[in-house]
Amino acid sequence: MSLLITKADGSTENFKVDKLKRSLRRAGADAIEIDDIISQIEDVLFEGIRTQEIYRRAFDLLRGQRSPAAARYSLRRALFNLGPTGFPFEKFLARLFQADGYDAKTGLEIRGRCALHEIDIAAYKSDHSFVAEAKFHARPGIKSDLQVAMYSYARLIDLKEARICSEAVCGIKEFWLITNTKFTSAAVEYGECSGIKMLGWDYPKNNNLHDRIQSAGIYPITVLQNLSAAQAEILIGRDIITCSDIMQNKHVLKQLHLSKRKHATLITEVESLCPKNKSTVS
């Protein structure tokens, strides 16, 4: 099908059915579900339709067929819904790195050679350590640009003599720039040249933020179909950021005053998303 669609940043590209199929497959939809959803989506496509509308329609169709798969499919939207501030996103990233064996902390102040730095994330394990700047954006069309990448490199230079813990591995040799959206091409070029580690929704091509979340099975509570935005806000205010946090602190659901039926439905959905229960609270 030859059809131009409008991306989040306002640019256009040809509709690629394989991209939609991959997205559905990553969410856990099977071949029959994918074919059915694609068939229904193709019936409503029109020239210039926005990618958000395509994926919203696909999500609605998937939600009607399988709740856990729908939750995973809505992951990108769920990250936006961690806002409006960037603090829950920082805590989510800390949980994600904790699942990979790091001791990860948020909201630190570290003295560099010339300035005091507010560090969004500092993480270390036996063979690796890094600090990171988390750039949270509340909508998909906003990208992290060259200026942000250059600022990150300047911070790395100033922090090179600092440490994030007393262990031998804890010298600051890596600075990561992490965003829930995308980087501009200029930012990517500068990051690759300067040595800044960059992690975005779809960057790098392999082991990007989306891949890491899916691999770890660490999902923000905002993916849950049986949790309203107001309820999610209450839980986030109590430092419940991921589905695994709910599993480890089920008593906190009393704050939501759910009926027995709704409580049971929510727990079932949470268990379907995070059976490994890896996350730890920082």
Image: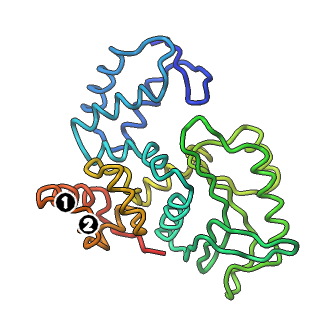
Q: Position of residue 236 (x, y in %)?
A: 41, 62
**Dot 2 and dot 1 residues touching (CB under 8 Å):** yes
Residue 253, label in figure = 2
Between 90 and 235, the residue placed more toward the observer is 235
For residue 76, side relative to residue 174 (left or right): left
Q: Residue at x 56, y 48 (%)?
A: 180
The quarter of the displayed image where residue 11 is located: top right
Q: Nearer the viewer, residue 162 or 237?
A: 237
Q: Which comes sooner in the sequence, label 2 or label 1? A: 2
Query: Total marks drawn?
Result: 2
Give the class, few, some or many, for how many residues have Cα within 10 Å of label 1's Cα (few <14, many ≥20).
few
Density class for disc 2 (Cα within 10 Å; few <14, some 14-19, many ≥20) is some
Instruction: Please report the residue visible at 55 percent of the width from the left and 52 percent of the height from the top.
Output: 207
Q: Is residue 42 above or below residue 244?
A: above
Kindly state the secondary structure of the residue where label 2 is placed: helix
List the single residue furthest toward the left.
Answer: 261
Q: Is residue 239 left or right of residue 230?
A: right
Furthest-right residue in view? 114
The amino acid type of the residue labelled 1 equals Leu
Image quarter hosting the N terminus? top left
Q: Write down the residue under mark 1.
A: 258
In this rendered view, identify the residue nearer to me: 165 or 85: 85
Q: Secondary structure at mark 1?
A: loop
> Which of these two is toward me, 38 or 70?
70
